[in-house]
Image (spheres, rainbow, N blue to C red):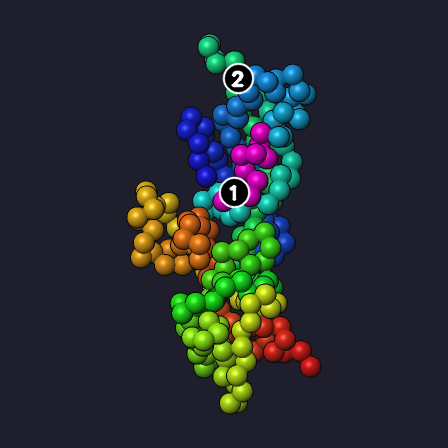
């Protein structure tokens, strides 16, 4: 995540499981003239939330919420502009699961390359075909993956709750154009919709207890 004219410094901290608290520092938070009449903390909080919430900070994770504002300095108004510029230090909660962590979500899409999982606030979790339960085959008619377990066909139906183990966290480089997306694949940041994902979680379900929750319920 970057903006021209601003300097962003990141200091990771700790939190529980898939979430971390990180300290960020933005040297150029701009408050527009129409918002200068608001209390300073309110105006800066709103600007920080618009800039960072639901955005991916490269090599850190997905910003989920603002935790606290630590300090505010400056307020410089440049000639001919009218906006005030502040140096703000703040902390945010970020989604960044660790390798080996088990996540629960819903199976959202299947194709020949693998399956896509969402945990609600984050949908770029991809399990490639070689990391599905073995043996698994792709059913062309249903467009679904099927785990063949003791000669029984266990369909991986869409919208089913699923348990996934994290194998890697990737921050793909932003492609320069839409044409550059072609051929990158899911782990290169291509979503099923053909857009770019700045954060991709690669997972696997090839172990006891992983995969569809319904498989393991008695």
Pinpoint residue 89: horizontal percent, then vertical percent: 57, 31
**Which residue corresponds to mark 2?**
83
| In magenta segment, residue 49 | yes
Q: Residues within 10 Å of mark 1 (few under 14, many from 20)?
A: some
Q: Is residue 38 visible?
A: yes
Separation of marks 2 and 1 at Cα, in angstroms: 24 Å
Q: Position of residue 81 (x, y in %)?
A: 48, 14
User: Is 74 or 200 nearer to us in this picture?
Assistant: 200
| Principal secondary structure, stretch drawn in magenta | helix
Residue 12 appearing in the image: no
> Is label 2 in contact with label 1 (beta carbons under 8 Å)?
no
Element assignment for label 2 = loop
Vertical side of 78 occupied by 165: above or below: below
Q: Which residue is mark 1?
A: 55
- Seen as rendered, the residue at the extreme top is 79
Q: What kind of element bears circle 1?
A: loop
Residue 79 x %, y %: 46, 9
Q: Residue at x 43, y 67 (%)?
A: 111
| Extreme residue in the front direction | 141
- Residue 159's tag is none
| Point 52% across, 20% down: residue | 85
Q: Quadrant of residue 75?
A: top right
| Residue interval drawn in magenta | 47-56
Q: Residue furthest bottom?
A: 151
| Left or right of 59, for residue 73 | right
Where does the image place residue 168, in percent across and percent down from the top left? 45, 60
Q: Which image quarter holds the C terminus?
A: bottom right
């Amino acid at each position: 995540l970057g903006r021209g004219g601003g300097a962003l410094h990141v200091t990771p901290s700790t939190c529980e499981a898939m979430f971390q608290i990180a300290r960020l520092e933005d040297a150029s938070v701009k408050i527009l003239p129409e918002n200068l009449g608001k209390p300073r903390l309110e105006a800066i909080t709103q600007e920080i939330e618009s800039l960072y919430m639901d955005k991916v900070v490269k090599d850190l994770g997905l910003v989920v919420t603002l935790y606290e504002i630590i300090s505010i300095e400056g307020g410089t108004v440049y000639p001919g502009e009218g906006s005030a510029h502040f140096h703000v230090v703040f902390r945010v909660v970020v989604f960044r699961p660790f390798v080996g962590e088990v996540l629960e979500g819903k199976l959202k899409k299947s194709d020949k390359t693998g399956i896509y999982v969402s945990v609600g606030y984050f949908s770029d979790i991809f399990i490639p075909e070689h990391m599905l339960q073995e043996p698994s085959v792709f059913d062309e008619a249903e467009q679904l993956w099927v785990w063949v377990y003791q000669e029984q066909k266990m369909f991986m139906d869409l919208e089913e709750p699923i348990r996934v183990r994290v194998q890697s966290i990737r921050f793909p480089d932003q492609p320069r154009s839409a044409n550059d997306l072609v051929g990158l694949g899911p782990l290169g940041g291509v979503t099923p919709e053909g857009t770019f994902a700045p954060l991709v979680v690669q997972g696997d379900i090839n172990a006891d207890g992983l995969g569809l929750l319904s498989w393991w319920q008695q």
